[in-house]
Image: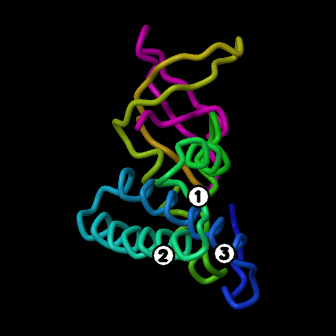
Amino acid sequence: MTDNINKSRNLSILEYLNILQKEYIVCILRTKIYTKLNDKAHWKKVAEYKKEKIKTISQRNTLDNIFDDKDIYNQIYKEIVPTFGLPFFIYKDEREKELLIKQDFTNYFYKEMEIKFIDQNNESQLGIIISCSPIMNLVVVKQTNNSEIKDLNANKVRRIL
């Protein structure tokens, strides 16, 4: 998801809270998929800041949020993380998107990670990532049950987190 997020002063409180919650989930996802410790630490710090903002806004306005209501969390999580394919990462502007889009792809589809994918018969299978190509939107996987190597469109692959 490329949301060119409007400045918070142009948003209603509900819109701003919704965006903060989406951004929080994206930050937590990045802490799980990024491999470098400094990247993980950065996204954890950003997530903590967003969590405090979410709680403050929610408390001040007596609004439910992803920390108080599991249904809200699940609804927003499903908006960010589809059943298959790359999550809809949020970027604050085009500059950040250019810096992170390839990094998000390669970390999500990182080699040797376990995945679930849809095969040519439209059946769900398990495998291990061998490599990926963000330019071609391609993930090369080794199927778990028979060691067959497959080139898959990234939209048919889900990383097991």
Q: Amino acid at mark 3?
A: Tyr
Q: According to the image, label 1 marks what residue?
A: 64
Q: Where in the figure is residue 117, as x and y percent of width and height?
A: 57, 25
Q: Where in the figure is residue 15, as x and y percent of width and height?
A: 72, 71
Q: Amino acid at mark 2?
A: Thr
Which label number is shown at residue 16?
A: 3
Secondary element type, mark 2? helix
Q: Nearer the viewer, residue 59 or 85?
A: 59
Q: Residues within 10 Å of mark 2 (few under 14, many from 20)?
A: few
Secondary element type, mark 3? helix
Q: Residues within 10 Å of mark 1 (few under 14, many from 20)?
A: some
Label 3, label 1: how far apart the Cα atoms are: 14 Å
Q: Where in the figure is residue 32, as x and y percent of width and height?
A: 36, 51
Q: Where in the figure is residue 25, as x and y percent of width and height?
A: 51, 57
Q: Indicate left or right for 22 with 25 as reference.
A: right
Q: According to the image, label 2 marks what residue?
A: 56
Label 2 close to label 3 by CB (< 8 Å): no
What stretch of residues is rendered in magenta?
135-161
Residue reaching furthest left?
37
Q: Amino acid at mark 1?
A: Asp
- Residue drawn at x 63%, y 34% is 83
- Residue drawn at x 65%, y 45% is 75
Say which quadrant the N terminus sits in: bottom right
